[in-house]
Amino acid sequence: MNRITTALALTSFLAALFTAAASAHEGKPTAQHAEPSKHAMPAPKVIIFDVNETLLSLDPLKTSVGQALGGREDLLPLWFSTMLHYSLVETLSDQYHSFGEIGTAALMMVAETQGITLDVDEAKQSIVTPLRSLPPHPDVVEGLKALKAKGFQIVSLTNSSSIGVETQFKNAGLTEFFEKRYSVDSVKKFKPHPATYQMVLDDLGVKPEEVLMVAAHAWDLAGAQNVGLQTAFVKRPGKTLYPNVPKPDYVVSDLLELAKMLSRKDSR
């Protein structure tokens, strides 16, 4: 097993472990199988979107991270999984650095394992600037328009900073679609900690079953399920479901497919 595969597996395991630990802490049972919920879920009132990879493509980062790592664009998945890994480590150990700070540190760690010399400023520059200028996936604008037209309340929840996602949405032309943008920097815990999702529920005054969490990350949806949210998995390239938790309520290829499925449900 190569380093990239090992890192991705470790991140999935740590996210699942984190969700299980959070469930135990909250006194909630964890799933023992991968079967979806049997009861009919109502059409959601609110849709929460994850941002990076779900809405925005990380392709520009492949170039900048690859340049920082001596042309090794293939190391992007290893860097991203390392960043997620240590965001969970910080949450479990009651510490907090911003996602950008963790991303910079993770890139330096990857560089060191590959024998590449990289200083802090170079690492930060290769991440922060392109991260704030990521393009939306081709289906995103039309998908959000369709969902907005159906009257769904649309918000976002990201591990990135408040100023970071504000800049991302402005540069990607997505600001108009979102009523609110939520960042984990408000609670200083990273997804999939229950407090991140609960923050949104409390602020909007809605019940968990009235809310749909949309993400391209199985660990994010596991955290949302743990709080009682409906979930939708977007099958972005290279993303798969985690077999040891219940299947999401919706599994779609893109946001246009999700809009169609929710339209059918809402019209029943």
Image (tube, helix red, strand yellow):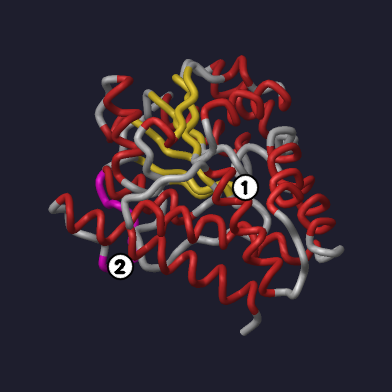
The amino acid type of the residue labelled 2 equals: His
Label 2 Cα crowd, 10 Å radius (few <14 / some 14-19 / many 20+): few
Using the image as rendered, state which of residue 160 and residue 154 is in the foreground: 160
* 36 falls in the magenta region: yes
* 238 falls in the magenta region: no
Residue named by callout 2 = 33
Give the mark nearest the N terminus, 1 or 2: 2
Label 1 Cα crowd, 10 Å radius (few <14 / some 14-19 / many 20+): some
Residue named by callout 1 = 253
| Secondary structure state at the residue bearing disc 2 | loop
Q: Which residue is located at x 30 percent, y 40 percent? A: 195
Using the image as rendered, state which of residue 178 and residue 230 is in the foreground: 178
Q: x, y (%) of residue 204?
A: 32, 20
In the displayed structure image, the side of residue 38 where residue 10 appears, left or right: right
Using the image as rendered, state which of residue 8 and residue 252 is in the foreground: 8
Q: Which residues are magenta?
A: 32-39
Q: What secondary structure do most residues of the magenta stretch adopt? A: loop
Q: x, y (%) of residue 206?
A: 27, 24
Find the distance from the CA under tag 1 to the CA under tag 2.
24 Å
Q: x, y (%) of residue 75?
A: 73, 65
User: Which quadrant does the C terminus fall into?
Assistant: top left
- Total labels drawn: 2
Q: Which residue is located at x 59 percent, y 43 percent? A: 100
Q: x, y (%) of residue 164?
A: 60, 31
